[in-house]
């Protein structure tokens, strides 16, 4: 049964990232399904930080779904963080990481430091994705690499494959969004 849950998580996770790269609003419902299956697996493997992260992802996914569904592309387009916003994003990720580490060590997570780092930076990256900030992809590349290692360490090969795919698509997503961001606008 656990293998089926992981395969479904992999399937919906890939649908999520492919539709996210293409800026489709329905990426968010796929993301919610992936989060649900992944949360079950995290509970099964005692990855408490990752489990709670899925709850946060679900909330941000609902926000992203609402924001992307209710805004036209003319008014809600890809943008880049300013230098100050980038600093705030990094500082926020570090603060969330420290808070997560404190909590995860208290509740007995099996990999508290790695779990905390991926939590802190992934929360910020997901929020940036919901706001269509191209910089989200740059956060995801190292997060996904760390998560591949964590999944292999915990014996979760399907999720290791998923996060490898996420990392690969993060490179592709950045490139695609970069092209859209730097596309000359038509003048009439």
Image: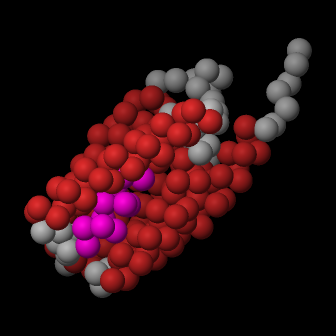
Camera sees residue 107: yes
Q: In the drawing, does residue 135 fall left or right of residue 7?
A: right
**Residue 185 vs residue 124, the one in the foreground:** 124
Furthest residue in direction top, as rendered = 188
| Rendered image quadrant of residue 187 | top right
Q: Position of residue 124 (x, y in %)?
A: 42, 45
25 above or below 149? above
Residue that extends furthest to the left in the rendered view of this protein:
107
**Residue 100, above or below 182:** below
Q: Which residues are magenta?
A: 111-121
Closer to us: 44 or 87: 87
Where residue 75 appears, as percent x and y from the top left, is 61, 21
Left or right of 187 in this view: 24: left
Whether the magenta-drawn stretch holds residue 113 is answered as: yes
Rendered view: 45 above or below 69: below
Nearer to the camera, 179 or 31: 179
Q: From the image, which quarter does the C terminus lie in?
A: top right
Residue 93: x and y, percent? 40, 48
Classified by dominant secondary structure, the portion drawn in magenta counts as helix
Does the magenta run of residues contain 58?
A: no
Q: Name the quarter where the N terminus is drawn.
A: bottom left
Residue 181 percent across, percent down from the top left = 73, 37
Q: Residue at x 17, y 56 (%)?
A: 103
């Amino acid at each position: 049964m656990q293998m089926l849950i992981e395969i479904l998580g992999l399937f919906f996770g890939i649908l999520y990232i492919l539709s996210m790269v293409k800026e489709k609003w329905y990426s968010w419902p796929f993301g919610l399904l992936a989060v649900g299956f992944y949360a079950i697996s995290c509970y099964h493997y005692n990855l408490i930080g990752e489990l709670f992260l899925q709850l946060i992802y679900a909330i941000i996914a609902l926000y992203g779904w609402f924001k992307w569904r209710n805004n036209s592309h003319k008014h809600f387009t890809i943008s880049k963080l300013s230098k100050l916003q980038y600093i705030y994003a990094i500082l926020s990720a570090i603060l969330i990481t420290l808070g997560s580490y404190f909590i995860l060590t208290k509740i007995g997570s099996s990999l508290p430091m790695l779990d905390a780092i991926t939590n802190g930076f992934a929360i910020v990256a997901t929020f940036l994705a919901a706001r269509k900030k191209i910089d989200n992809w740059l956060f995801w590349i190292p997060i996904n690499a760390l998560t591949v290692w964590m999944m292999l360490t915990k014996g979760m090969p399907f999720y290791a494959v998923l996060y490898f795919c996420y990392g690969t698509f993060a490179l592709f997503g950045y490139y695609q969004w970069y092209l859209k961001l730097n596309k000359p606008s038509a003048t009439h």
